[in-house]
């Protein structure tokens, strides 16, 4: 994904900290997923008692792809407590 490909400058900044390259990729993947999660458009429904997320939301797709989670399950858990 483009987020991981464009992390060269950030990667150079954590190398002196002794972070292994394999861990760096994981760190950047998680950070990119969190940033995408913050950009999700969650729509309120029924006077604010419920919500929904579009299954076509590009940020949801990226989030799920970066973390390897099931799209349908994430869509459900973002809008339901149980």
Image (cartoon, rainbow, N blue to C red):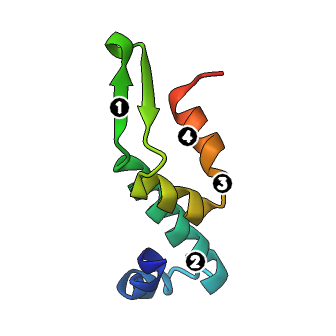
Residue sitting at x 45%, y 64%: 32
Quadrant of the rendered structure where residue 47 is?
A: top left
* Mark closer to the chain start, 4 or 1: 1
Question: Residue 67, position in %: x, y?
Answer: 61, 60
Point 47% across, 52% down: residue:
60
SS at circle 3: loop
* Viewer-nearest of discs 2 and 1: 1
Residue 64 horizontal side relative to residue 5, left or right: right
Spatial CA distance of label 4 from label 2 is 25 Å
The residue carrying mark 2 is 25
- Tag 4's secondary structure? helix
**Most foreground residue, 77 or 43:** 43
Q: Earlier in the sequence, mark 1 or mark 3?
A: 1
Q: Secondary structure at mark 1?
A: strand
Q: Rounded to the nearest whole Å, what is the CA distance between mark 1 and mark 3? A: 21 Å
Tell me the residue that label 4 is attached to. 75
Q: Counting residues from the N terminus, which is met first, the one under dot 4 or under dot 2?
A: 2
Foreground disc of the pair 4, 3:
4
Residue at the (38%, 46%) spot, across then down: 40
Judging by the rendered image, the residue that carries numbered circle 3 is 69
x and y, in percent, of residue 50 in the image: 44, 19
Mark 4 or 2, closer to the camera: 4
Counting residues from the N terminus, which is met first, the one under dot 2 or under dot 1?
Answer: 2
- For residue 19, what is the image quadrant? bottom right
């Amino acid at each position: 994904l483009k987020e991981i490909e464009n992390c060269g400058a950030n990667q150079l900044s954590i190398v002196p900290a002794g972070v292994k390259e394999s861990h760096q990729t994981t760190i950047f993947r998680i950070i990119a997923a969190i940033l995408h999660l913050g950009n999700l458009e969650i729509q309120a429904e029924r006077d604010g008692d419920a919500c929904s997320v579009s299954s076509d939301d590009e940020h949801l797709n990226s989030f799920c792809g970066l973390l390897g989670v099931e799209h349908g399950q994430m869509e459900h858990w973002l809008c339901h407590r149980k």
